[in-house]
Amino acid sequence: MKNAALKSRLNAQAIEAGVDEAGRGCLAGPVVAAAVILPSDFSSHRLDDSKKLSEALRNSLREEILNQALAWGIGIATVDEIDKINILNATYLAMHRAVQQLNVFPQHLLIDGNRFKPFQGIEHTCVVGGDGKYLSIAAASVLAKTTRDQIMKSLHEQFPEYDWNKNKGYGTMVHRNNIRRYGVSEHHRKSFRLLPDQLSLFDARDLHSL
């Protein structure tokens, strides 16, 4: 049975893609976006905003979405891009890249959130809390979150001192304490306020590049 809390689509007359991101508020790692076009008869009583789901359920739903979606795409904006153009513009960039990866051209985009930079003339609608309202955005939420989690777990193998396998780059107390203890890695967002005494984290020779 279809999740009663989630709608199939906003514009039933258009090929509609849901778009969402993961990692916008993290201190480390890229921001990842996904775009998903679902078939009109897609149903899942388990699908919801990825933040409300367990990791095991997200991973299970990921396979369901990849197998049943008419099209899906993943877009990534790197830490360097985040620091260069700021997190908002990097989020738009990741979303645009996700839409570009779709092998079915969408006529309408459903964007989670309240702002979006128009892309290639495609009509769009921003929906605050959209990942808890529309199936396609919820699906994009799951793909973005699971993809980013995989990236952070991989980076954890190189930098285990930051516990990215657990905190995924978010600013938990453990993560911040380990930044204080070990310093900043190449995967930390240097344009972000990592600690209150942030300047002490960097060598003087690095300050000119921030």
Image (spheres, helix red, strand yellow):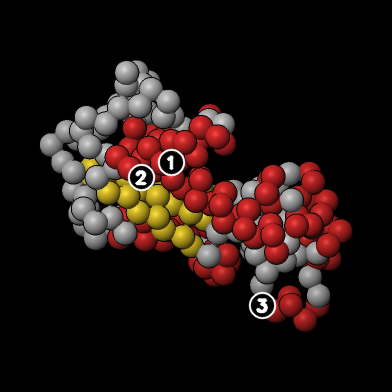
Q: Are marks 1 and 2 in contact (CB under 8 Å)?
A: yes
Q: Residue 69: x and y, percent?
A: 29, 42
Residue position for label 2: 66
- Outermost residue on the bottom side: it is 205
Q: Residue 62: x and y, percent?
A: 43, 41
Left/right of residue 79 with respect to residue 127 in the rendered view: right
Q: Residue 53: x and y, percent?
A: 53, 30
Res. 129 in view: no
Q: Residue drawn at (83%, 51%), measured in percent from left and top?
A: 177
Q: Residue 167: x and y, percent?
A: 68, 45
Marks counted in the figure total 3
Residue position for label 3: 209
Residue position for label 1: 62
User: Nearer the viewer's eye, disc 2 or disc 3?
Assistant: 2
Q: CA distance from mark 2 to mark 3?
A: 40 Å
Q: Residue drawn at (50%, 39%), measured in percent from left and top?
A: 59
